[in-house]
């Protein structure tokens, strides 16, 4: 409209008057009523395959675009400014459409091409299944297949299991950082240079520097002791914090997959469930267990390994094999 209408080109969009009113009302209803409802519903999604984050990001970006359109359309100063001659209210509508295209259409096409390329190399063996599960896009596609097959709990177990395992890697890195900081402090203290007094100095100056040196050494020694105490206390607090995090995540994982009233019911042997239940009771803080904090962390690290192997076998025998056969049939059509 800007390039074809001389009046708008000369005076800007303030010459339009109330012609934008229907659009303004429509956008206002969407911003005030529509977006909050959609955002609240999106936050309720129990989606671990990335779609939830994409929807929430889209809603937030669209909200900024719509607010920009409303501000320029309602504010007379902005509507009649020279800036609007080059960035009209419709610019935000264009950006809104562009965001939708990039987030959904282009991203979806990219994922489809990636999946088609990777599915050509699918084979019915454990190594091929492991490679597929490590690929985030293929895992998401395989998760959708498992939803239709009513076995999505196995994929959710796989994802949460490795999130749980990565927690221990982070714990080890943080613990090593504390140790390295502690050793660095001691090495710096031990390597401090000692100042030698020349023999040709006067006795008075020598005594003065001697007293100063003793005072400095005393300060250094005290600082070293304080640093050691602080670092030891800090390490104990860090270890306790790490243990609390590990214990919390272990119980959360247990409630989600292993407990009697678990959210997701996985199909594993009763002996494995019994073994996990006994270990969880043994490591309960309120129990009279002789296990140290480090021993409990080691137990938490391996407590779900048997269940993981059982679930992986189920994925391979039931879901993955069917998925490969389905992809082979689709490629032959």
Image (cartoon, helix red, strand yellow):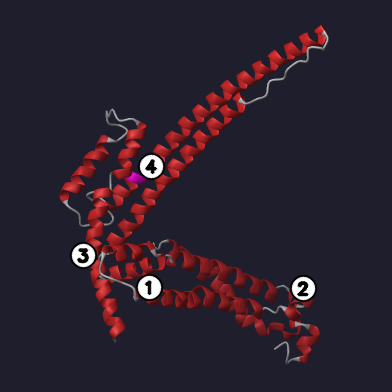
User: Where does residue 304 sit, x and y in percent of width and height?
Assistant: 28, 48
Disc 1/disc 4 C-alpha distance (Å): 36 Å
Q: Please identify, in this view, whether the residue under mark 3 or under mark 1 is nearer the observer.
A: 1
Q: Residues within 10 Å of mark 3 (few under 14, many from 20)?
A: some
Secondary element at tag 1: helix
Of residues 169 and 141, the one nearer the viewer is 169
Q: Which mark is residue 246?
A: 4
The magenta-colored residue range is 246-250
Q: Please identify, in this view, whether the residue under mark 2 or under mark 1 is nearer the observer.
A: 1
Q: Residue 79 magenta-drawn?
A: no
Residue denoted by label 2: 77
Give the residue drawn at x 78%, y 15%: 198
Q: Which mark is residue 317?
A: 3
Q: Residue 249 magenta-drawn?
A: yes
Disc 2/disc 3 C-alpha distance (Å): 67 Å
Task: Let me know if residue 47 appears in the view.
Answer: no
- The picture quadrant where one finds residue 193 is top right
Specify the quadrant that holds the N terminus. Answer: bottom right
Q: Residues within 10 Å of mark 4 (few under 14, many from 20)?
A: many
């Amino acid at each position: 409209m800007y390039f074809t209408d001389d009046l708008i080109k000369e005076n800007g969009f303030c010459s339009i008057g109330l012609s934008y009113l229907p659009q303004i009302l429509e956008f206002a209803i969407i911003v005030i009523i529509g977006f909050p409802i959609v955002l609240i519903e999106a936050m309720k999604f129990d989606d671990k395959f990335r779609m939830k984050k994409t929807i929430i990001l889209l809603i937030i970006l669209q909200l900024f675009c719509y607010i920009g359109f409303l501000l320029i359309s309602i504010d007379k100063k902005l509507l009649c400014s020279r800036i609007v001659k080059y960035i009209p209210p419709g610019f935000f509508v264009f950006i809104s459409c562009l965001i939708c295209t990039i987030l959904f259409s282009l991203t979806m096409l990219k994922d489809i091409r990636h999946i088609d390329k990777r599915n050509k190399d699918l084979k019915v063996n454990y190594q091929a299944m492991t490679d597929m599960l490590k690929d985030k896009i293929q895992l998401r596609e395989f998760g959708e297949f498992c939803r239709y097959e009513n076995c999505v709990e196995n994929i959710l177990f796989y994802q949460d299991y490795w999130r749980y395992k990565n927690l221990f890697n982070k714990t080890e890195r943080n613990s090593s950082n504390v140790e390295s900081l502690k050793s660095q402090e001691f090495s710096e203290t031990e390597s401090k240079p000692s100042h030698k007094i020349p023999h040709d100095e006067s006795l008075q100056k020598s005594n003065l520097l001697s007293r100063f040196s003793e005072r400095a050494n005393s300060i250094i020694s005290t600082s070293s002791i304080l640093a050691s105490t602080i670092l030891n206390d800090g390490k104990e607090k860090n270890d306790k914090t790490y243990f609390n995090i590990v214990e919390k995540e272990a119980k959360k994982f247990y409630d989600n997959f292993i407990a009697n009233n678990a959210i997701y019911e996985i199909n594993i042997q009763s002996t494995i469930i019994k073994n996990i239940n006994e270990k969880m009771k043994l490591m309960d803080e309120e129990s009279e267990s002789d296990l140290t904090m480090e021993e409990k962390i080691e137990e938490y690290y391996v407590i779900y390994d048997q269940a993981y192997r059982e679930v992986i076998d189920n994925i391979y025998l039931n879901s993955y094999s069917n998925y490969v056969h389905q992809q082979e049939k689709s490629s032959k059509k």
